[in-house]
Amino acid sequence: MQAVATERPWIERLIASPRVRATYASTVAHVFVLLVLGLLVIPLDVERPPTVITLSLKEPVVTATDERGLELGGGAEATGGPPTAEPVTPDAYVADAATRPDPATIAVEPAPPPIDLVGEPPAFPAPPRPSPQPEPAAATSATRSLPGPGDAFAGRRAAGRGAGVAGRGGSAASEAGVGRGLEWLARHQAADGSWRFDLSGCRCDGACRPLGSATSTTAATGIALLPFLGAGQTHEEGVHRETVTRGLYYLMSRMRATPRGGDLSEGTMYGHGVATLALAEALGMTGDRMLVPYVRDAVRFIETAQDLHGGGWRYLPGQPGDTTVTAWQLAALKSAALAGVAVPSPTLDGVCRFLDRVQVRDGAGYGYLAPQDRPCTSAIGLLCRVYTRWDREATLDSGLARLAKPGPDREAVYQNFYLSQALLLRNHPAWPRWNRRHRDQLVARQADVGHEAGSWSFADPDTAPGGRLGHTALAILSLEVYYRLLPIYTADAAQHGW
């Protein structure tokens, strides 16, 4: 019987082909050789040089203008714009090379030496970059330049400070009180550079009573920095340079970038106004252009948080205003303008509209939320009228005379803080007598025993949430009134265009 031959499937014939088997073998051999060569070429261990990060508050010199025509910096050699902003969230900042300006686009000043912090330095986060502002196509007539370092704050330094004390009613005892107060504030700074109204996080850790209940760390840090700046201490010079550096650095790290501007409030516009005032004064005293975007964005937040109908500010953006919060925003705006940051006129016009709404007796007295005649808010309102160059001088002086007649209230530190400024700025006839009593009672009330030595505490319900920290800061600022006041509020300011 003859066998029937069957044809094998094509796949078997392909696999059995000698040519195909040779191709398989060649492919496997080549892959193996390539793997071996790759392992030989790639190093197993790469040593990378460490990245050195220097803590400094200096910014590269950059010439640019923002949308308001403000010149943001430096010399003719600068060719770049403002540093690029990165989106930020609070408490989540990363310090690496990616966030630094491109060295090819800026002219860099020599970096200052690293700051030698006392003790083991805290791990500071990198401050966030506020959102960049679009640049105009060309400079306009509104372009303004930053004043030179300290030009408008000369009264806070050396000879100017001494002349202010001698000519405006200070004394050796009041200056000694300022020095002791600054030492107390420096001892109560927290490890991260902040201050807290409950004095947590510092070496005292709440041992100095009474403790404050307000929770905004930007408000506490701002109010604690102002006395240092008032005494001519900055992040560039002074025996408290390191303390000021760490405080400013903390404030910058707490700014949140928002569509409304840079938010420093931590839930209350008190905090934003006080923190902005501190940053603006530091900018005005040093001309350090690193501070420009922070002050500019903080001013923008004040503008957008204003109650457009009433013209004031309260705790949250857009709320109908109250006199105390409004005063802090106004002071911040005026200081920012003095430092070279543009402030729109409509914002200041709104402040005048608010004051008109809460005044009584044709502007000689002021209420908190509505027209009333309360001593503390009247002192605040009258000082705000001085800030806004109100032309009804007779009404101003009569209102101040009525408040000054009883003399300074021993416990009303907040009222006295505002009234002392208004009386001095107006060169009021009641100032010499009122000042002597106020100055001497502050010196006598300063604590001189134990850990509280150098501080103050008052039974003032208006400032109770600030505790001993808030009271001490306000008392020091009151004793610095002879040289701390900004020239923009004086008669000479108009002559200089301030």
Image (cartoon, rainbow, N blue to C red):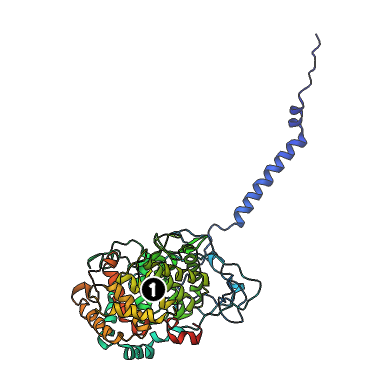
Amino acid type at mark 1: Asp
Q: Quadrant of residue 200?
A: bottom left
Residue nearest the viewer, comparing 214 with 382: 382
Frontmost residue, 365 versus 318:
365
Q: Position of residue 266 (x, y in %)?
A: 40, 61
Q: Which residue is mark 1?
A: 362
Residue 224, can we see it?
A: no
Number of numbered tags placed on the structure image: 1
Left/right of residue 237 with respect to residue 431 in the rendered view:
right
Furthest-left residue in view? 449
Dot 1, crowdedness within 10 Å: few (<14), some or many (≥20)?
few
Left or right, 146 with respect to 236, comes to right
Quadrant location of residue 425?
A: bottom left
Q: Position of residue 453 (x, y in %)?
A: 22, 75
Residue drawn at 48 percent across, 73 percent down? 291
Instruction: Give the residue furthest to the front.
Output: 361
Q: Is residue 145 left or right of residue 166?
A: right
Q: Is residue 67 visible?
A: yes
Residue farthest toward the right in the current orientation of the protein? 2
Name the element at disc 1.
helix
Estimate the x, y position of residue 208 in percent, counting from the top left.
23, 68
Q: In front here: 183 or 403?
A: 403
x, y percent for residue 228: 35, 78
Looking at the rendering, in which quadrant would you find the N terminus? top right
Judge by depth and name the residue closer to the eye, 363 or 456.
363
